[in-house]
């Protein structure tokens, strides 16, 4: 039913890709980049494999390239997520 809820709270905030990193300096931690790539793979692998009908070797190659690009990006700049928190209240 449309219009059944009102927005109680709406917040936007940034979070570092590396949950252990609370400082804003650019730094390189190869372990963190590998963990980020693995986490992304866990979340997306099945979606990519089934949607694009990819074989295991293609998925392996895709995420190896992704890990490389994440590492290159984080050498230069901090990675950030943008989170949105929405709290609804029933009318």
Image (cartoon, rainbow, N blue to C red):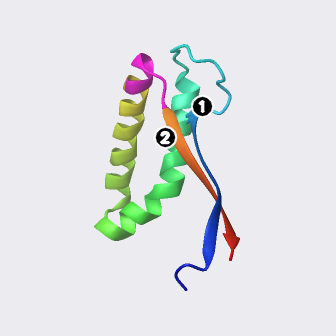
Residue that numbered label 1 is attached to: 18
| Residue 26 drawn above or below residue 57 | above
| Residue under the image location 40 percent in, 17 percent down | 76
Mark toward the start of the polypeptide (1 vs 2): 1
Label tally? 2
86 left or right of 55? right
| Residue under the image location 66 percent in, 23 percent down | 22
Report x, y in % for residue 59.
Answer: 37, 53
Q: Is residue 77 magenta?
A: yes
| Residue under the image location 43 percent in, 21 percent down | 77
Q: Quadrant of residue 8?
A: bottom right
Q: Residues within 10 Å of mark 1 (few under 14, many from 20)?
A: some
Cα separation, mark 1 vs mark 2, equals 11 Å
Q: Residues within 10 Å of mark 2 (few under 14, many from 20)?
A: some
Residue extending farthest to the bottom is 1
Q: Which mark is residue 37?
A: 2
Comparing labels 1 and 2, the label whose residue is closer to the camera: 1
Q: Camera-side residue: 87 or 33? A: 87
Q: Camera-side residue: 15 or 49? A: 15
Q: Write the start and end of the magenta stretch as one range.
A: 73-79
Report x, y in % for residue 10.
Answer: 60, 52
């Amino acid at each position: 039913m449309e219009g059944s809820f009102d927005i109680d709270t709406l917040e936007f905030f940034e979070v570092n890709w590396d949950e252990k990193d609370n400082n804003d300096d650019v730094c390189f931690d190869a372990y963190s980049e590998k963990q980020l790539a693995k986490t992304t793979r866990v979340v997306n692998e099945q979606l990519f494999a089934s949607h694009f009908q990819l074989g295991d070797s293609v998925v392996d190659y895709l995420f190896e390239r992704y890990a490389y690009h994440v590492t290159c990006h984080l050498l230069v700049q901090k990675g950030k997520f943008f989170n949105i928190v929405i709290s609804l209240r029933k009318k």
